[in-house]
Image (cartoon, rainbow, N blue to C red):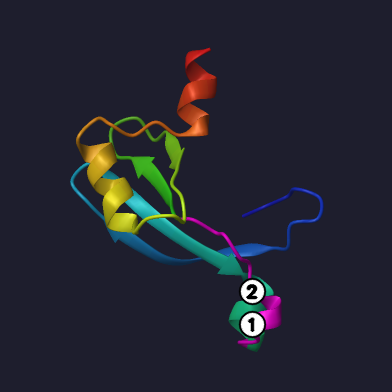
């Protein structure tokens, strides 16, 4: 999932389907294989993918995934990716 230098190989661990988006959860492959906390990725907030456009959106870790899904569904979601696209 990642080809960024310094970022370990990542894998999708769960997908939720919602009326307006899909929610993808991910973790490092090494953690999935070892189960060791030392191999886990911290701060890995879920990614929302718009069902109509396919555009992906960042969420956060400060609130529950449900909060970000609700904000997106109600048109109030503004992530760094969205702000960059509007510039």
Asked if residue 2 lies in the magenta stretch, the reply is no
Q: In this view, does 27 lie to the left or right of 8?
A: left
Disc ID at residue 40: 2
- The answer to whether the residues at label 1 and label 2 have Cβ atoms under 8 Å apart is yes
Q: Which residue is drawn at 39% across and 31% down?
A: 78
69, above or below 41, in the image? above
Circle 1 residue: 37
Q: Nearer the viewer, residue 40 or 56?
A: 40
Residue farthest toward the top in the current orientation of the protein: 87
Gap in angstroms between the C-alphas marked 1 and 2: 5 Å
- Expressed as whole percent of the image width and height from the top left, the position of residue 55 reads 42, 33
79, above or below 30, in the image? above
Image quadrant assignment for residue 51 = top left
Q: Which of 11 and 80 is in front in this view?
A: 80
- Expressed as whole percent of the image width and height from the top left, the position of residue 84 reads 54, 22
Instruction: Name the magenta segment's main secondary structure.
Output: loop
Q: Which of 20 and 46 is in front in this view?
A: 46
Q: In this view, does 29 lie to the left or right of 20?
A: right
Q: Magenta stretch?
A: 35-45
- Expressed as whole percent of the image width and height from the top left, the position of residue 70 reads 23, 45
Q: What element carries label 1?
A: helix
Q: In this view, does 69 lie to the left or right of 87?
A: left
47, above or below 30, in the image? above
Q: Which residue is drawn at 26% across and 40% down?
A: 71
Q: Residue at x 59, y 79 (%)?
A: 32
């Amino acid at each position: 999932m990642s080809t960024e230098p310094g970022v370990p190989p990542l894998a999708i661990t769960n997908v939720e389907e919602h009326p307006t988006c899909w929610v993808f959860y991910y973790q490092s492959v090494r953690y999935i294989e070892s189960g060791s906390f030392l191999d886990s990725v911290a701060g890995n907030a879920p990614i929302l993918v718009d069902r109509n456009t396919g555009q992906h959106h960042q969420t956060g870790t400060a609130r529950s995934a449900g909060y970000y899904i609700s904000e997106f569904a109600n048109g109030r979601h503004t992530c760094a990716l969205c702000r960059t696209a509007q510039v």
